[in-house]
Amino acid sequence: MPPFLKRKVLYLIGEEDNPWLAALKCPCGCDDVIQLSLIKNDTPSWNLITRKQGTTLSPSIWRTKGCKSHFFFRENRIKWCD
Ligand SMILES: [Zn+2]
């Protein structure tokens, strides 16, 4: 885990072909660091889908604390939920 995260960058921590953690700065601007487990047995955990169009995380990311942002990370883009 890098000590300082840049905004608008998705960090993958783990082995190259087998990351177990995704981290990003909250896109709402609050600058909190969001950590998402990619380990299937964890609850909650996320699927990392890497395609030519970009990286997708599934399901959506819904923060339960802080700013309570709810958004999708889809093909390298943030898509906000209402
Ligand atoms: Zn936020």
Image: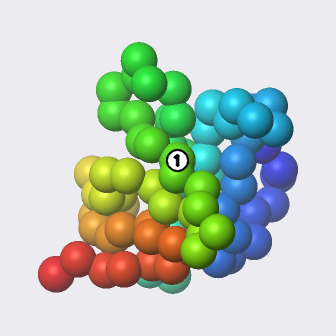
* Label 1 beta carbon within 8 A of ligand 1: no
| Marker count (numbered) | 1
Residue 56 position within the rendered picture, expressed as x and y whole percent measured from the top left: 49, 61
Give the quadrant of the N terminus. Answer: top right
| In front of the other: 26 or 11 | 11
Would residue 32 be visible to someone looking at this image? no
Q: Name the residue: 16% across, 81% down.
A: 82
Residue 17, given in percent of the width and then of the height, sits at: 75, 35
Q: Is residue 22 left or right of residue 40?
A: right
Would you say 35 lies left or right of 63 here? Answer: right
Above/below status of 19 relative to 68 = above
Taking depth in this image into account, of 28 and 82 the one nearest to the observer is 82
Q: For residue 63, which quarter of the picture?
A: bottom left
The residue where tag 1 is placed is 48
The residue lying at 46 percent from left, 55 percent from top is 57
Q: Residue furthest top?
A: 41
SS class, disc 1: strand
Locate residue 59 relative to residue 34 in the image: left or right: left
Closer to the camera in the image, 34 or 17: 17
Q: Report the residue at 59% width, 74% height from top.
A: 53
**Colouring:** rainbow
Q: How dense is the environment of label 1, judged by Cα within 10 Å: few (below 14), some, or many (20 and up)?
A: some
Classify residue 6 as left or right of residue 63: right
Q: Position of residue 50 (x, y in %)?
A: 60, 56
**Viewer-proximal residue, 14 or 35?**
14
Where 49 sits versus 71, above or below?
A: above
Tag 1: amino acid: Leu
Q: Is residue 79 visible?
A: yes
From this viewpoint, which residue is outermost toward the front? 52
State the residue at coordinates (51%, 35%): 37
